[in-house]
Amino acid sequence: MNGHVYIIGLGPGDQNLLTLEVLSLLPTLTDIVGYGPYVERVEVPNTVRKHGTDNRQELDRAHHALTLAQQGHRVGVVSSGDAGVFAMASAVFEAIDQGDISLKTIQVTVLPGISAMFAAAARLGAPLGHDFCAISLSDNLKPWELILHRLKLAAQADFVIALYNAVSKARPWQLDTAFDLLRKELPTDIPVAFCRAISRKDEHIELTTLKNAKSSMGDMQTLVIIGSRYSRVIQPLSDCNPWFYTPRSITKK
Amino acid sequence: MNGHVYIIGLGPGDQNLLTLEVLSLLPTLTDIVGYGPYVERVEVPNTVRKHGTDNRQELDRAHHALTLAQQGHRVGVVSSGDAGVFAMASAVFEAIDQGDISLKTIQVTVLPGISAMFAAAARLGAPLGHDFCAISLSDNLKPWELILHRLKLAAQADFVIALYNAVSKARPWQLDTAFDLLRKELPTDIPVAFCRAISRKDEHIELTTLKNAKSSMGDMQTLVIIGSRYSRVIQPLSDCNPWFYTPRSITKK
């Protein structure tokens, strides 16, 4: 008998950013698997078993969820933001792809969520209003040279860049190296936003320029958005924060 | 007296993909402004005035919403998907940026939504599981040469590529030109997905390869996702569609 794995995007933190689809699914699960703090965040009846694990254990976690499903359970694998963006969805499919053939009989459904980058963009204005890319700055799973290569091409393409896993205690020098590279490719007055813990109690946004951006402005909960040469900042006359947006139009030079 | 403009992402279509935040805001509005079919989709009390307009009138629509707000109204500007992605959020900030200084006194709040690309990715598996970019293929607002330049660099960076506005009756040749360019840069066996009307009644997905991809597989409601050289397709042993995912790991060559 085979169960079902649901891969669930919990959004950036605020319960109001959950979808109705996720809210109605959660109480029907038998098990919830994920990184400890995300599992704790989920509000479900006591009958739903919670399996919180450490960070960086994505593939083990995926195997655990698939094993529970093979036992006939309805398993939710939870990620913050959207589960398809540098999160658990890829890990589950990797585990199926690399694992025993019997794993391919398990039903898998992915439920999208509000990603960190779109939640951050909404707070800022519309920085992702034109062509953009998302890059994870972590070299845990890919070579650092490839990250630099992608950053350089992204700058040459003039994409707005959303940087995930931008700051880590284990690799504090990486974000500054990335900024140094981008300063060689782009005008240094373009806006850069450090967006921490969006929609949570300790939300904090710092808007600066590429010239002045430095890694100490962020921490492990910070997403960084780097504008393109067309991005602009508007100073409102209300008591709001400045708006950071990228126009839809690019006229021929 | 100044009102408030709320820029609202309605998600890809299914009401279950709305956030609680959007659902609780909608009945408190006095006016809803947007492209006709999106405005019609919104379920609100009869007291909320609906102002549906034609497509391609984004800037006029933004000005209309801002004028209503200046009259003291609570105006919702609705977009499909996430309003910050090739949608109305940029248009509203552009209108403020270019318009009369008094527009800068208006309160503006952006509410994120489930974007078309993440809804499509969830249906497919996890194609956006690694570094990716989003490019609008429309040359209404930017030069075609810039689009080709960005596509080429995106392929060289080996981003997964989400193509918005990929197919248009007015420019049917563009997507095939884009595929021709990508076939020169990338292995032609990488997966390409045509994702039409995701979460709506007429949802349709076609999974093919870069070699066989052609524009006739899509229409104006189709988002196209082009894998990277690391993307993979898994054939499940259940009656599900194949899964298309991009692994998180890239090992050094």
Image (cartoon, coloured by chain):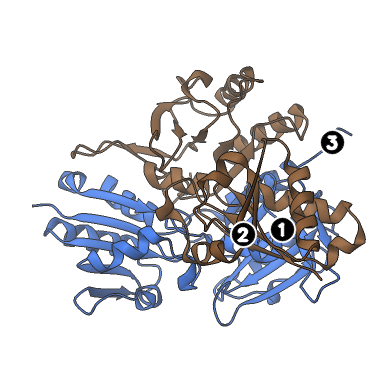
Chain colours: A brown, B blue
Query: Looking at the image, can residue A246 be seen?
Result: no
Evaluate if marks 2 and 1 touch, with contact meaning CB atoms under 8 Å apart.
yes
Q: Which residue is mark 3?
A: B251
Q: Which residue is mark 2?
A: B163
Q: For the residue marked with disc 3, what is the amino acid?
A: Thr
Q: Chain of mark 1?
A: B
**Above-or-below relation of A152 to B138:** above
Counting from the top left corner in percent of width and height, residue A31 is at 65, 56
What chain letter is assigned to the residue under label 2?
B
The residue positioned 38% from the left and 52% from the top of the image is: B90
Circle 1 residue: B226
Give the mark nearest the N terminus, 3 or 1: 1
Q: Mark 1: few, some, or many residues within 10 Å (few <14, many ≥20)?
A: many
Task: Give how far apart the Cα atoms at labels 2 and 3 are.
Answer: 27 Å
Q: Give whichever of A211, B230 is nearer the camera.
A: B230
> What is the CA distance from the residue labelled 2 to the residue labelled 1?
8 Å
x 62%, y 64%: residue: B120
Residue A152 in picture, x, y percent from top left: 65, 32
Q: Secondary structure at mark 3?
A: loop
Q: Is residue B249 visible?
A: yes
Residue at 48% across, 36% down: A229
Of the residues under marks 2 and 3, which one precedes in the sequence? 2
Asked whether the beta carbons under mark 2 and mark 3 sit within 8 Å of each other, the answer is no
Q: Of helix, strand and loop, which one carries label 2?
A: strand
**Residue found at the very far right of the displayed protein:** A101
Q: In the rendered structure, which amino acid carries the disc numbered 1?
A: Ile
The span from disc 3 to disc 1 (Cα, nearest Å) is 21 Å
The secondary element bearing badge 1 is classed as strand
Identify residue type, mark 2: Leu
